[in-house]
Amino acid sequence: MKLNKREIEEIDINFNQIILDSSFLKSSIQYSLTEDILNVFYENLFQIIKQKSKVKIGYSFFPEDEIEKSKNRIIIDGKPLSVGDIIYRNLRKTESIFIITCTIGAEIEKIIRKFFDSGNYIEGYTLDLLASELVELSADYLQDFIEKKFSNSQIGFSNRYSPGYCGWPVSDQKILFSLLPDNFCGIKITENSLMLPIKSISGILAVGKNINKLEYECDICDDSFCYKKRKL
Amino acid sequence: MEDYLNKLAYCIEKGRLNSQSKIPSNMLGQDGVEELINQLIQLNTPPKIIIEKGLIKGMNEVGNKFRDGKIFIPDVLLSAKAMNYAIELLKKEFPSENMPIKGKVILATVEGDLHSIGKNIVKVILEGNGWKVIDLGVDVSSEKIIVKLKEDEIKAIGLSALLTTTMLNMKKIIIDLRNSGFNLPVAIGGAPVTQKFADEIQADFYSSDPNEFVNFLDKLN
């Protein structure tokens, strides 16, 4: 598909499109739970997340004539995103940008709270891990969906970058969402730049002839608190 | 009796509630907290001894192993659940005995932030170590904290935030508390929080380890 005009899309995704089998989610959270705990709680929690999550993905594409770049900033439709030097280094050759969002909905968050309130801490904790992993996998799915839909031999796609990571202030979330229609994917932004539902992801993907995906993106960043570093 | 107390401490450490529990897998069918407490009661063991030499001994082991990186948050949550379970059993058996409470602590996720998982983990660990937690929830303003401070005898406050934007509200809460004449210790925590930030906003305590918060609180008594 050609990438020369603005395009926007929101899609409801079936859980089974993202999670291929029940062990898939299990293997992705194994880094933080012992096998004992996983084996006892996993199947029940997997059914909960399968039935109660409502995955929604969306993107808005901004073509080359709506993108400007200046030092450490990507300006989309006149609105500056202060992505910082770490991300800018990898995006400075971008020609166009996808703003991406995805969510798994608000229901899971309520169930996590109920687990904690009723003293079922490990269930609440594990479900929270599963929900975080599911939203990450949804973002992976979205990224893959965009790349397949728009790929051609002339262009490459970057890794996805989000406000709050790699030195990009989370407060830019508001600017990012001001470039999207209200309630896009059912996500709202609070005064403090928090996305609701909490289990949501936003970010940008850069596109261009000289844009490539980095194999080890965490090598470019020194944020020791980042959850991605904990997984490595 | 000593043997039962040691086994009880071990079951607290491993989060084994009773003989039906599936965790840990290498103890299937063996006694858990429930059976061991019943056996100790039959031996006329005073609740104070059960708590000190069984429950607290087990939780101390959990704290030490967590500090040393030998166990992780999920293991601590299982232990804390077993501890709370044990306390409830003792309360039923000895309704006239006052279960020891070290004091009351307010926990809150600060105004503007709706993340609760970190605060909830700290709550479970504090309760498992004998502290009564007044959980004010998420998106909590200084006004709400001050109302609670006027109503109740509180030993300390723990504030949580997950975002760099909302952690700035910790500073406002500390200033508001001091301006209202409340000088009790304020501890802060959360993914973006650092010791440097804690120093800047004059928080009394910071740690990424909830058990260190327990140690800090225990020293207040």
Image (cartoon, coloured by chain):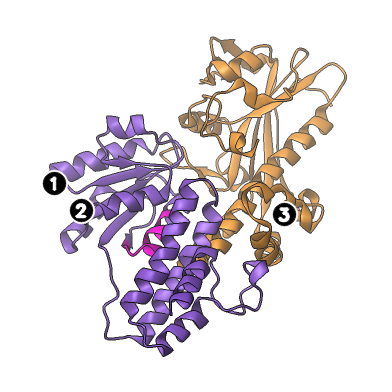
Chain colours: A orange, B purple
Judged by depth in the image, the label closer to the viewer, 2 or 3, is 3
Mark 1 crowdedness (10 Å alpha carbons): few <14, some 14-19, many ≥20: few
Q: Given contact means CB atoms under 8 Å apart, are the residues at marks 2 and 1 in contact?
A: yes
The numbered mark at residue A142 is none
For residue A98, say whether it is visible.
Answer: no
The numbered mark at residue A26 is 3
At 37% from the left edge and 62% from the top edge, which residue is drawn?
B129
Q: Is B184 inside the magenta-drawn segment?
A: no
Residue A206 image offset from top left, x and y in percent: 69, 22
Three-letter amino acid code of the residue under disc 2: Ile
Disc 2 and disc 1 on one polypeptide chain: yes
Give the letter of the chain under mark 3: A
Q: Which stretch is magenta?
A: B122-133
Q: In this view, does A52 lie above or below B84?
A: above
Q: Is residue A200 above or below residue B25?
A: above
In the rendered image, which residue does mark 2 sit on?
A: B146
In the rendered image, which residue does mark 1 sit on?
A: B180
Residue A15 image offset from top left, x and y in percent: 75, 54
Between the residue at mark 2 and the residue at mark 1, the CA separation in whole angstroms equals: 8 Å
Give the letter of the chain under mark 1: B
In this picture, residue A73 sits left or right of residue B143: right
For residue B195, say whether it is visible.
Answer: yes
In this picture, residue A151 sits left or right of residue B10: right
At 38% from the left edge and 81% from the top edge, which residue is drawn?
B90
